[in-house]
Image: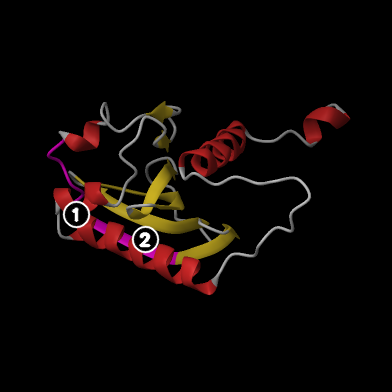
């Protein structure tokens, strides 16, 4: 292994960082050189966590309208997983798909303020669907919009079937 490859950033992280920049842009956030950056507010974290819990609760209750309402309805909505990055709300299969997990266990729900109006969230999941149980980690990037808080980025990376959960 070359010294350069020892510090390579995983592709998923690069995509997430690019999406973070896009989310900031779509949320209408700007920075001005020479101005002091403002810190995220506790209210941002509380409101993003509330939306996070709403998103997971909508999955539990199989409430498509509530579930979809938590997402940014934009061409810049980013969805990433093992199949790769997909963009856009209009072409998202979740808008039409009628399948829901039989069970979803979400643990270790965490939120981290990034900057005013942007909060990162993650949780560990165990999901059962059609007699197959998988575990993994899912991420969300929450942005404050004029319409309220929305999810601008969502990811899910599962472990191979049968592998024990290893999420922290």
Q: Secondary structure at mark 1?
A: helix
**Disc 1 marks which residue?**
66
Residue 51 placement (x, y as % from top left): 34, 61
**Sequence order check: which comes first, mark 2 or mark 1?**
2
**Disc 2 marks which residue?**
52
Q: Residue at x 50, y 64 (%)?
A: 111
Left/right placement of residue 93 relative to residue 42 reads left
Q: Which residues are magenta?
A: 97-108
Residue in front for this viewpoint, 49 or 127: 49
Q: Secondary structure at mark 2?
A: helix
Residue 37 placement (x, y as % from top left): 70, 58
Left/right placement of residue 159 relative to residue 14 reads left
Residue 82 placement (x, y as % from top left): 44, 32
Q: Is residue 90 visible?
A: yes
The part of the image, by quadrant, that contains residue 149 is: bottom left
* Circle 1 Cα neighbour tier, 10 Å, few/some/many (<14 / 14–19 / ≥20): some
In the picture shown, does residue 13 fall above or below 59? above
Residue in front for this viewpoint, 129 or 95: 95
The part of the image, by quadrant, that contains residue 72 is: top left
Q: Is residue 166 visible?
A: no
Residue 137 placement (x, y as % from top left): 46, 51
Q: Residue at x 24, y 50 (%)?
A: 69
- Report the Cα–Cα distance between label 2 and label 1: 12 Å
Labelled disc at residue 139? none
């Amino acid at each position: 292994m070359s010294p350069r490859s020892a510090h390579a950033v995983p592709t998923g992280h690069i995509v997430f960082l690019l999406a973070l920049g896009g989310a900031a842009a779509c949320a209408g956030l700007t920075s001005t050189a020479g101005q002091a950056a403002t810190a995220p507010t506790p209210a941002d974290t509380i409101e993003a966590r509330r939306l996070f819990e709403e998103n997971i609760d909508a999955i539990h209750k199989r409430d498509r309208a509530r579930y979809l309402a938590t997402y940014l309805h934009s061409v810049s909505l980013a969805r990433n997983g093992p199949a790769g990055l997909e963009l856009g709300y209009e072409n998202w299969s979740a808008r039409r798909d009628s399948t829901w997990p039989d069970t979803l266990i979400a643990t270790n729900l965490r939120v981290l303020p990034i900057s005013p109006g942007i909060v990162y969230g993650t949780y560990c999941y165990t999901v059962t669907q059609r007699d197959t149980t998988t575990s993994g980690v899912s991420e969300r990037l929450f942005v404050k919009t004029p319409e309220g808080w929305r999810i601008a980025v969502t990811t899910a990376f599962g472990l191979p079937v049968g592998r024990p959960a290893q999420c922290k």
